[in-house]
Image: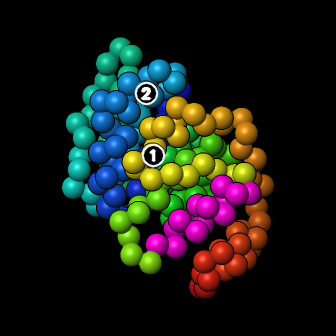
């Protein structure tokens, strides 16, 4: 059963949760062959009602100690643009769509998403363009991110967004 995993990390990104749980999005996921949607909603106030039917299921939770199992079980990941979430999905070799929160001030997330897209590792969009992207994207065009070299990702972050630890 093909599944989509959506994560907002530890933050609140209600706009993304509302977008992916909308009737239009659920119909689109079904038309693309997905049968399960798992939403990790962080501290969000938007809590869609979970359901299970013969043709589709929606599961919702706030937090888990690790997202690793949800990432492994998914066929598509839709994530906020947090560096940790992006790295986890890419290291697992999963197709990734990053949704940038364009309401954030001084948003370095868009720079990270733009660069990783430019290098061919993921697709990125905003909530307002997500459904159109899902309809038109070709997941086979994405490059495989080689795991095991986190220092390269750190160098990349430093170069792109001036990230320092």
Main secondary structure found in the magenta portion: helix
Q: In the rendered image, which residue does mark 1 sit on? A: 129
Which corner quadrant of the image does residue 131 belong to? Answer: top left
Q: In the rendered image, which residue does mark 2 sit on? A: 28
What mark, if any, has residue 42 been given in the picture? none
Q: Indicate which disc, 1 or 2, sits on the residue closer to the N terminus.
A: 2
Please state, as top left, top right, bottom left or bottom right, where the C terminus lies in the image: bottom right
Task: Report crowding for label 1: few under 14, some 14 to 19, many 20 or more residues within 10 A (C-alpha).
Answer: few
Q: Circle 1 — which element?
A: helix
Residue contact at pointers 1 and 2, CB within 8 angstroms: no
Q: CA distance from mark 1 to mark 2?
A: 14 Å
Task: Report crowding for label 2: few under 14, some 14 to 19, many 20 or more residues within 10 A (C-alpha).
Answer: some
Residue at 72% in and 51% down: 120
Residue 4 visible from this viewpoint: yes
Residue at 55% in and 52% down: 124
| Relative depth, front residue between 165 and 140 | 140
Q: What range of the chain is rendered magenta?
A: 107-119
Residue at 34% in and 43% down: 19
């Amino acid at each position: 059963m093909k599944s989509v995993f959506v994560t907002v990390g530890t933050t609140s990104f209600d706009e993304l949760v509302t977008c992916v749980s909308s009737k239009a999005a659920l119909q689109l996921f079904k038309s693309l062959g997905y049968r399960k949607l798992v939403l990790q909603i962080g501290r969000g106030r938007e809590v869609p009602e979970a359901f299970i039917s013969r043709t589709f299921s929606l599961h919702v939770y706030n937090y888990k100690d690790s997202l690793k199992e949800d990432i492994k079980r998914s066929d598509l990941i839709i994530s906020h643009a947090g560096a940790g979430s992006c790295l986890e999905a890419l290291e697992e070799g999963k197709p990734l769509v990053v949704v940038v929160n364009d309401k954030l001030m001084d948003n370095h997330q868009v720079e990270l998403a733009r660069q990783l897209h430019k290098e061919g590792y993921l697709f990125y969009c905003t909530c307002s363009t997500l459904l159109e992207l899902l309809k038109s994207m070709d997941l086979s065009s994405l490059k495989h991110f080689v795991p095991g070299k986190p220092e390269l990702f750190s160098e990349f972050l430093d170069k792109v967004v001036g990230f320092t630890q």
